[in-house]
Amino acid sequence: MELFVAGVLALAAAAGCSSNPEPGPPPQISSATAERDVVNGLASLKSTVTVQFDRPFELAPSRVPLASHFEFDVPLAVGGSRRVLVATAERPEDDSRSIVLKVDTLIPDGATLKVARRAFDAEAAGEMEVTVEGDLNPALVLLATTELQVSDPAFYDAPVIAEVTEEDRDAVAQREALEFHLNQRQVDPQTYLDALAIYDAISVDIVASPKLRAALAALTGTFAEPALASLLTEENCTGLPAARIAFETPPGGPELIARVTYVGSGARVISVNTFAEGERIEHLMPILAHEAVHCDGLDGRTEELAATAFDGLLYLNLVAADPELARSRTRVARELNIDAVALINSGGRLPESIGVLPSPGVTQILPGTNSPYGSFAEFIVAAYPQIDLATSPTEPLAQAYADILAQTAGMDAGDPFSIRYLDELLGRAIHPAVLVAAIQAFGLAPAS
C-alpha cells in the first residue's frame, strides 16, 4: 500500500510539473508577405502582411497589444528609410503558424520586419528580423502615393501654332516621315512593310493630305490599327468608308482639334482643324484614333472619356519611343501632353500605373496649376459640357481597342465604356518601361 501511494504521489507530481512546462525557444520566422489592400475593387494605401512561422506557437502573456511587438523599416524610393508601426495584429483561427498584420501604409518589397522576442517569451530580449516580400517595390509605392508635377515652368504656357511647310503637303516627304517614325518605334520588318503599303494604298479621294495618310498608316502595329478598317472600309456602323478625312475647320466647332460629322449618305467626315496641319504625324495619330471611335452619332460622356483615354495611352507609347514629342509646345501637342500627365496621375485600381479614376494618393492631377480636378475622368468630362448623355452604346471600335489591350494585359474582355473596367485595363495594359520613359520625358517629379 505504501508503495502504491508513493507511486500515485509521484505520478501526480509529474503531472503537476507537465502542466506548467518551461517555455521553449521562440518560433523562427519563415516569411513575411505584404499585399496592398483593395476595397470594393479600388486600391487603398494600406497593406496586409502575413507573417509565417516555422511551427505552431503560443504567445507570452502581455499587457500590451500584440501589434506593439512588430514594426517595419521601410525603404524609400528617394533614399533612406522610415519606421512604420503596425495598426493591428491577429492570429487566424485556422492557422496556428501565422500572424496577420494590418498597416496603415503601403509596405514595399524589401522592407524589414522586426519582431520582438518577448512576444513569445516575456523574459526574452532582442528582435527577430525578416525581409518582406511585397507586390510593390519602393518606386511603385512612390508612384501609388504621390502626385507628380512637371518640372518645366513653360509646360502649361499658351501654345503656338505649328508652321505649315511644303513638306507637310508633299507625298514623298511624308512617306519619309512615316519611315522615320516606324524606325523610331523599332517595328518589326513586316509591320514596316505593311505600314508603307497602307500609306501607298490610301485613296487620295478620301484622304487628300499626305500627312494625314502618313498618320493613319502609322497606326499599323499599334492597338489602334483597327481604326484603319473602320475609317477606310465598310467595316463600321455606317457600312460606308469615310467620305472625307481632311484638314478643315470642324463644323460647329472652330476651336476643336477635330470632329466627326456625316454626309447625306451617312458616311462620316473627319474634320481635323487646319491649325493641326503643321503638327508631327505622331501628334495626329492619337487624334485620328480618337475620332475613329465615334460612329453611331450617339456621343455620351463615357464615350468621350474612353476615346480620350485610348488616345492618351497611344500617345504615351509614342512619347516613350520619342521623348522630343513631350517637349513640343504646339497646339495639339500641348493638349496631348496635358492629358498624358492627367492619365499618369490617375488610377483607382492601379494608382502606380495610369488610369481614369482618382488615385488614392493624389488630390490634384495637374499640380502646380489652378486646375481643381482630381482624376482624368473628371477632367475630361468637364471638357465636354455640351454632351447631355451620360452614357451611350459601346462603339465597336472602342471594343476592338479594348479587346487587343485586354489580351496584352492578360485580362478578361470587358466593356470599355464601364469606367471601372477602363481604369484597370489602362493600368494593366501600359508596359512599365513605357510609363517610366514617359515620366522621364515629361520631367515629372513628386510635387512638393
Image (cartoon, rainbow, N blue to C red):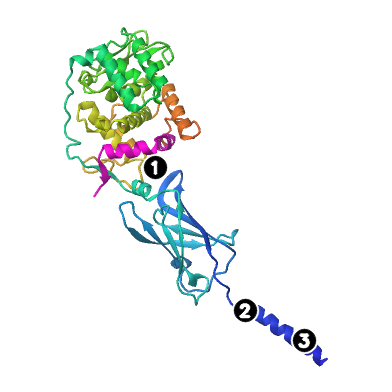
The image quarter in which residue 287 lies? top left
**Lower sequence index among marks 3 and 1:** 3
**Local SS, label 1:** loop
Farthest front residue in view:
189
Q: Position of residue 26 (x, y in %)?
A: 54, 70
Farthest right residue in view:
1
Q: Number of callouts in the render?
A: 3
**Local SS, label 3:** helix
Q: Of the residues shown, which amino acid type is indicated by label 1?
A: Gly
User: Is residue 191 left or right of 286 when viewed as pictured?
Assistant: right
Label 1 sits on residue: 348
Label 2 sits on residue: 20
> Between 320 and 38, which is closer to the camera in this rendering?
320
The local crowd at label 1, few if under 14, some if 14 to 19, many if 20 or more residues have their Cα within 10 Å, is many
Q: Which residues are magenta?
A: 420-448
Q: Which numbered marker is on residue 7?
A: 3
> Between 79 and 223, which is closer to the camera in this rendering?
79
Residue 91 appears in the rendering: yes
Q: Position of residue 150 (x, y in %)?
A: 23, 41
Q: Of the residues shown, which amino acid type is indicated by label 3?
A: Gly
**Local SS, label 2:** loop
Q: Position of residue 112 (x, y in %)?
A: 42, 59
